[in-house]
Amino acid sequence: MRRFGFALLLVLGSCTPAPSSPPAPGAASRQSAAEADATLASLRRVDDLPLYEMTYTGDYDTSATGPQPTAATPFGCSLFAAFGDPGRPMFGRNFDWDPNPALVLRADPPDGYASISLVDLRYLGLTAADDPKGDRRLLDAPLLPFDGLNERGLAVGMAADEGASATPDPAKPTVGSVRILRLVLDEAATVDEALAVFDRHNLDFTGGPPLHYLLADASGASALVEFTAGRQQVERRTGPWQALTNVPLIGVGEQERRHDQRYRILTDSLGRSGGTVTEVDAMGLLRAVSQANTRWSVTYELGTGRLQLVTGRRWQSVHTFRLAPG
């Protein structure tokens, strides 16, 4: 973990084509045998979604070829960043998708920032019927953050954007559209640094729906990243909040944006509160925009590393985690 005085205790694949045979389980692991064993031994079942929790010990290779997801229909997601209370910036996110098991993953790579993230385990080949205890496929979990927060207070999440397209620049390396979230969590302390990570890479949307992204940090900065007509575009927040669902936003007027019901609910609520939300408010807002297939609803307190999580719309059962275990 790199220390800089901070008080805190999202298509996979690389630039190479998908292999003709599946990669070996744990292909991303750069761990010693003892570190891999410690990682797998830390796995704990939290609820019957099923939701698991695991702490990854040691290093991993972000350029490793990982599992290649496919998606017949787009992801649905709702995200927001709220900064009305500068002392308590908040990031919220619903992940709406198939009924798959999920993992809360802590990672602390030796050359990157510590982070906590949410992983859909189906993309590692695990189903709700599987017992993942000791399964070496879990050693590839760092490649799959669908949303997350790092020790510097930088949060990131993604949502499907069916109209997005990214034209590659031959001078840049290409990474998958979920793998980029791992690079951001490992390498960026601020929204500006996260945008620089995006700028250094081409994104490959092959195998899944094209995506757009919401970034936010503990200083109060946030930004949308979208890909329109092959080009990356950025919109920084101008008010005390920023929101994202599954409709393109950059270059689109507010009236047209509000045709999307979930975006309208988010913006109306955040507008009334001036972007000031407590953890309870934030989870209530996620509840208001949840769908029948909402798999998890998560709030990240950017200044403290505290995470609250509801799975499968079971709002009466809120799990609390922190970036550092214990």
Image (spheres, rainbow, N blue to C red):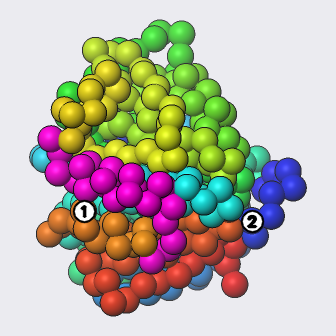
Q: Main secondary structure of the magenta part?
A: helix
On whether residue 269 falls in the magenta region, the answer is yes
Q: Residue at x 46, y 28 (%)?
A: 235
* Frontmost residue, 292 versus 37: 292
Crowd band around label 2 with a 10 angstrom C-alpha radius: few (<14), some (14–19), many (20+): some
* Frontmost residue, 230 versus 192: 192
Q: How many marks?
A: 2
Residue 302 visible in the current orientation = no
Which of the two marks, 2 or 1, is nearer to us in this view?
Answer: 1
Q: Kindly state the secondary structure of the residue where label 1 is placed.
A: loop
Q: Kindly state the secondary structure of the residue where label 2 is placed.
A: loop
Q: Give the percent coordinates (x, y) of residue 100.
A: 26, 69
Q: Which residue is mark 1?
A: 289
On whether residue 148 falls in the magenta region, the answer is no
Q: Residue at x 34, y 45 (%)?
A: 244
The mark that comes first in sequence, 2 or 1, is 2
Q: Give the percent coordinates (x, y) of residue 83.
A: 56, 53
Which segment is the magenta one? 259-280
Quarter where residue 197 is shown:
top right
In the rendered view, would you say 300 is above or below 198? below
Q: Give the percent coordinates (x, y) of residue 217.
A: 62, 48
Specify the amino acid type for callout 2: Leu
Q: Residue at x 14, y 69 (%)?
A: 292
Quarter where residue 302 is shown:
bottom right
Q: Residue at x 41, y 28 (%)?
A: 203
Q: Which residue is mark 2?
A: 8
Quarter where residue 9 is shown:
bottom right
In the rendered view, would you say 193 is above or below 184? above
Residue 321 visible in the current orientation = yes
